[in-house]
Image (cartoon, rainbow, N blue to C red):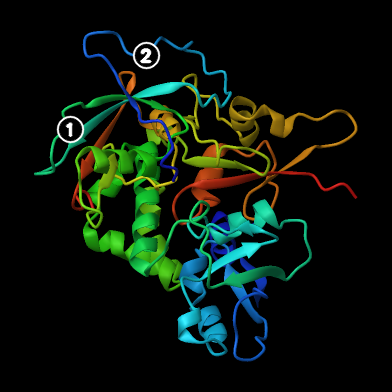
Amino acid sequence: MSDNAESPTETQKDEPSTPQQPTEDSGTADDKKKIDVLLKAVGDTPIMKTKKWSVEKGRTVQSLSQFISRFLKMEANEQLFIYVNQSFSPSPDQEVGVLFECFGSDGKLVLHYCKSQAWG
Amino acid sequence: MADDKDVLRDVWFGRIPTCFTLYQDEITEREAEPFYLLLPRVSYLTLVTDKVKKHFLKVMKAEDVEEMWFDFEGTSLKWHYPIGLLFDLHASNTALPWSITVHFKNFPERDLLHCPSNSVIEAHFMSSIKEADALKHKSQVINDMQKKDHKQLWMGLQNDKFDQFWAMNRKLMEYPTEEGGFRYIPFRIYLTMSDRPFIQKLFRPISTDGYTHTLGDLLKEVYPVAISNDDESKHYQVVIHGIEPLLETPLQWLSEHLSHPDNFLHISVIPTPSD
């Protein structure tokens, strides 16, 4: 996926997250909308200094995975596994917005990341 | 009236007659004949095309062969989508056999995921099942299964063994009687003319006041364009496994009987062909 994609923006820890979108789902695919993602490390995978990120809905899992790998300064041959609900690994081309809609809680999508397979 | 179990068999054994032709720019030592194959609707391209690869490798040099990939009329075919979905979405109203072009070079990185081995297909398949169960049962059923049970689901698909697969899959189709159905229905609606790959949202099969939701209810909620008609004609076809189920069909029933082996209802919305 594109390396030109804007990096997710850090959410300020003490401020409320991104401006409230209307709660009614209008059903329109507005890629400018962002969702809050909370990244959690599994096992002895390095913990990211910044865990909360504001990510565009249309961003793919693969794109986010590449971002985390770069942030953690991982080697090119190292793999990163991403999990939702501590149970399944979404497809790399899956959009985070869809994952947030289906598996988000308390206004954010929690994603676990790991250098090895955690939940098989 | 067909027995419900017959529907499960019909879905599993659905086949699409396909003609594989080598892309004209591939380098061959002699002419490549097209290869004909019946593709299982419920499987994945890279799982069932070893014969296709063997056939074309006979006329090619090893150095001219990279990862095999497919296109239909210029659209790269995503191996991680079920075959039947790819057909319904891109080739529904074209003549059979389905004509697919085979490539061994210039892999379209932007369109397709790589598929270096069957274990990648297995991982993708099992993840889909887990995601579906997260929606249906908060993952309780899939987590209660042992690793060997998970393996049985995969082996059933890989080896085209209906009974082996359903011996395990039936557990994923159960629900507490008092609930009346799954928590949420695993579904994806694919549109031919859209930026986004598919629509997937939370949707209950039974409303809080006990009303049984239908396919029509789902579409009205998440993609009303699909069922808007003027008096003259229907603009779109809503297709699952090559058929247009009645919009009055209960969604819970569709989920139990017309899901793919990955436990998702993959629904194509395509423009009605103008005659």
Q: Residue at x 60, y 37 (%)?
A: B195
Residue B208: horizontal and vertical position, in percent? 46, 20
Judging by the rendered image, the residue that carries numbered circle 2 is: A18
Q: Extreme front residue here? A: A4
Q: Give me the C-alpha separation between circle 2 and circle 1.
A: 20 Å
Q: Name the foreground residue: A75 vs B258.
A: A75
Residue B54: horizontal and vertical position, in percent? 51, 84
Location of residue B149 by image quarter? bottom left
Residue A39 in view: yes
User: Tag 1, which chain?
Assistant: A
Amino acid type, callout 1: Met
Q: Name the foreground residue: A90 vs B59.
A: B59
Which image quarter is the N terminus of chain B in?
bottom right
Looking at the picture, does residue B145 appear above or below residue A60? below
Location of residue A15 by image quarter? top left
Judging by the rendered image, the residue that carries numbered circle 1 is: A48
Q: Is residue A39 left or right of residue B224?
A: left
Label 1 SS: loop
Q: Is residue B121 left or right of residue A115?
A: right
Label 2 SS: loop
